[in-house]
Image (spheres, helix red, strand yellow):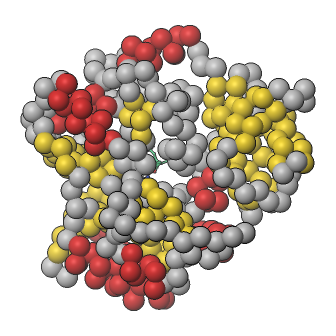
Amino acid sequence: MKQYSIAKSRRLRSTPYTSRIEKQGVTAYTVYNHMLLPAAFGSLEDSYTHLKKDVQIWDVAAERQVEIQGKDSAKLVQLMTCRNLSKSKIGRCYYCPIIDDDGNLVNDPVVLKLAEDKWWISIADSDVIFFAKGLASGYKLNVKIIEPVVDIIAIQGPKSFSLMEKIFGKPITELKFFGFDYFDFEGTKHLIARSGWSKQGGYEVYVQNTKSGQKLYDHLFEVGKEFNVKPGCPNLIERIESGLLSYGNDFDNNDNPFECGFDQYISLDSEINFLGKEKLKKIKSEGIQKKLMGVQFDIKEISLVGSLDLKDEKDNIIGELRSACYSPHFKKVIGIAMLKKPYWEASKTVKVEINGNFCTGNVCDLPFI
Ligand code: THG
């Protein structure tokens, strides 16, 4: 395969850790929120095995924050999500689908409640800040919306707990999943959450003091030696096995939250007011026509760029394969597919044409593991 380099410019933002990860041997980048997001450090499969066993440090600065502050901040955040935030607490993170007036998805961020009148929306890859500013303007809300200087370092993997305890002490191990608090590193306070885009456990440090964050980055590698720490990044194989969805890949603004299996984050009965609420009620009563599901194929490799049509025995297009990889755990190719009704039922057979060869597979529920 021909290899290309990426042309850097002001428009394609670097992170405070870019020079470090380049010294450490990043081999692929993707672009996320107009910023460099490392996509590989050598073999994806080696990285996957290491992530499940040890601990990795990830430069996920591309998970940008949209800060909403002011008297109407809670109202605006609620307006954007179908998840009921009326009982939300300071010091907690919430996974919140963001929905537009048509009931379609705009993003699937983690929302952090910093204070009653201050929130961070930790976004996936779409320009939520303009959506928020447009709403604030149209609804005449008293809010200030900015993209603050916050560059996340994620510490992921089963040994992340021991590594973080060595640096921050016992209290950090007492953080609950999706809770956050402030922890001291050499005199600087850092917001640290127990979260991250893997199911192997870990933390995310929301670095605001860049210099201290860079020192912390280096310190994590120093202290992490005994835990076999390595640089890493969100891993395609691990995240597909774990059923962590990716905006822009598995779903986008042409899909609604019911189609993506976000049912548990949709609150239609409460008093809360959010965009697309009436539309979602209508969709719920009429039922959906397509659904995101897992698929498995008895083949050993696939390289998926964009999406692939899925067909039935009679060659009718019945859906679209949106992400896929070879899974070392299942020893076959697994993927995430948007399937038309009624083909989305688990254990149905699907056909896919890859490089001119047809192979058959079957539908299953998400997550795989
Ligand atoms: N961390 C932070 N910001 C982010 C991501 C992140 N922004 C972009 C992207 N990732 C947003 N998407 C997700 C998707 C899934 C999860 C987090 C962010 C996730 N889900 C858990 C699960 O599925 O088990 C828990 C969800 C829940 O609360 O029920 O962690 O990773 N800062």
| Residue toward you, 106 or 4 | 4
Given residues 224 and 235, the one toward you in this image is: 235
Q: Residue at x 39, y 89 (%)?
A: 222
Q: How many circles with numbers are drawn on the protein?
A: 0
Q: Position of residue 75 (x, y in %)?
A: 20, 30
Q: Point out the image quarter for the N terminus.
A: bottom right
In this rendering, position of residue 311 left or right of residue 112: right
**Residue 366 versus residue 149: which sits nearer the camera?**
149
* Residue 245 against residue 316 in the figure, above or below: below
Task: Pinpoint residue 86: horizontal percent, then vertical percent.
Answer: 25, 30
Q: In front: 174, or 115?
A: 115
**Figure check: 68 above or below 255:** below
Spot occupied by residue 88 in the image (x, y as percentages of width and height)? 26, 38
Residue at 58% x, 55% y is 239
**Residue at the location (82% across, 33% down)?**
311
Say whether residue 281 is left or right of residue 131.
right
Q: Is residue 323 above or below residue 363?
A: below
Q: Position of residue 249 (x, y in %)?
A: 57, 46
- Dividing the picture into quadrants, the one containing residue 207 is bottom left
Q: Is any part of residue 24 visible from this angle?
A: yes
Which residue is at 23% across, 78% downward? 212
Decide if residue 83 is in sight here: no
